[in-house]
Image (tube, helix red, strand yellow):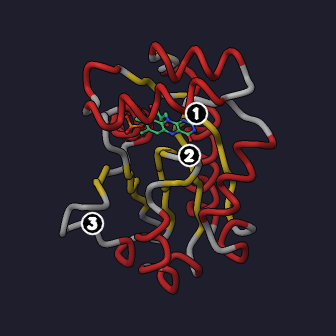
Amino acid sequence: MKGAIFFSGKYGSTEQYAKWIGEATGLPVFDINDPNADPSKYEYLVLGSSIIYFRLTNRKWVRENLSILKGRSKILFSVSGAGPSNKLNRWVSKSLPSELLSQMEHIALRGKLDHKKVSWGVKIMLWMGALFNPDPEASKDERYGFDYMDKSSIEPIVKLVEQFQARARIV
Ligand SMILES: Cc1cc2nc3c(=O)[nH]c(=O)nc-3n(C[C@H](O)[C@H](O)[C@H](O)COP(=O)(O)O)c2cc1C
């Protein structure tokens, strides 16, 4: 049984996590914007997506590939500033069709935001967001950036992939 990782990110943290998971599991890694990224070639999928403005960035690709994704085993990892929480779960459930979400395990990872890497327009949006964010920690993160990258946080995903691989050996 073959598997692969399909990631969607803009500033490098989702890609970094996808590569770490690829190294730990031996699965190939594809950017969803790569024309060779074809999920129909694989039996199980690890989908990685950053969260920008309260939504998963892979949501359009997911809808376009819905019929392919539905029949396959899946793991979703999100990458965001916010840590695991009800708020984060709401953003994820608003991004994906519920019938798909109910078929997958979701693991929330925390990423990185470097203000030097974003445009002035985005910087201004982040500063405005920081002004109105009622959560002081999240407001500080928006204002100054953050780095929550943690290689060890991929462990639950690696374990799930190992379970898929073990199941495949039995079948
Ligand atoms: C314009 C912008 C909007 C963001 N919106 C959110 C958000 O709504 N919630 C959140 O938790 N993090 C948010 N973040 C933080 C990103 O999820 C975090 O920086 C992530 O690591 C980006 O992934 P990437 O490096 O793969 O693009 C935002 C970052 C940017 C630049």
Q: Is residue 1 positioned above or below 26 on the image?
A: below
Q: Residue furthest bottom?
A: 67
* Residue with the mark numbered 3: 37
Secondary structure under tag 3 reads loop
Secondary structure under tag 2 reads strand
Residue type marked 3: Ala
Residue 154 appears in the figure: no
Q: Quadrant of residue 13?
A: top left
Q: Nearer the viewer, residue 58 or 130?
A: 130
Q: Are marks 2 and 1 in contact (CB under 8 Å)?
A: yes
* Residue with the mark numbered 1: 109
- Please tell me which of labels 3 and 2 falls first in the chain: 3
Q: Is residue 73 positioned above or below 136 on the image?
A: below
Give x and y (percent) for residue 65.
44, 79
* Residue with the mark numbered 2: 77
Give x and y (percent) for residue 152.
55, 20
